[in-house]
Image (cartoon, grey):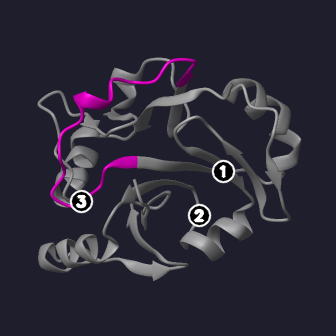
Amino acid sequence: MPHFLNSVTLLSDPAEALREVFARLGFSVAPGGGVALENATLAPRGAVEAGAAREPLSLVMTARPNDETAHTPHPNGVRALAAVVRTLENPADHAETFSRAANQREMRATSAGLELKLANARLEILTSAAFDQIYGGAGDALVFATPDLAATRDFFERAQVAFEEKFGRLVVAVGATLMLAFEAQER
């Protein structure tokens, strides 16, 4: 059985700046700086806090799910993390590594990259060109699930959050290498 995506650590210096971005985007940020969703936890960390982590995004996948009752409602309507999107020049070269980490042998391979379905989210590995076309820019993306994309759009407009609509998603650039995307997803 595929693993569950339990947490995502986001490296940022200073981490407080990323926590402020999440709060401005309508996420309920816990006193420790994390964001609890139905299926995963986001943990912005500074380089010193993260210790040995060197990647901008570090994932924790396990055979057991998080406690779904631990999440907090978010004013932007987001319920869960739908996908983590990484950018690599030759995604197929890394298929075995991601397959092993996700405990998932089945994957969808296209000229844009790879998609692995985890037990509670998707893991996508795209080429830089595909990422730029789908999300705009370069880097990595977190894709969030919301039951009402129009309500999320309204929240962003009221909060004066700059976003683009791309392929049925609302996309917000956070710095030069991180995109946050919001997509409609039924429960």
Q: Nearer the viewer, mark 2 or mark 1?
A: 1
Residue 143 % position (x, y)? 47, 56
Disc number at residue 77? 3
Residue 64 disc label: none
Magenta region: which residues?
61-80
- Report, in whole angstroms, how far the alpha carbon at label 2 lies from the one at label 1: 14 Å
Using residue 105 as the reference point, say whether residue 143 is left or right of it: left
- Reply yes or no: does residue 87 show up in magenta: no
Q: Residue at x 81, y 33 (%)?
A: 105
Residue at coordinates 74% horizontally, 33% vertically from top-left?
98
Query: Regarding mark 3 in the picture, which secondary structure is present there?
Result: loop
How busy is the neighbourhood of tag 1: few (under 14 within 10 Å), some, or many (20 plus)?
many
- Residue 148 pos. (x, y %): 30, 69
| Residue 81 against residue 50 in the figure, above or below | below
Say which label, 1 or 3, has the lower sequence index. Answer: 3
| Residue, disc 2 | 138
| Amino acid type, label 3 | Gly
Q: Nearer the viewer, residue 4 or 20?
A: 4
Q: Mark 2: which secondary structure?
A: loop
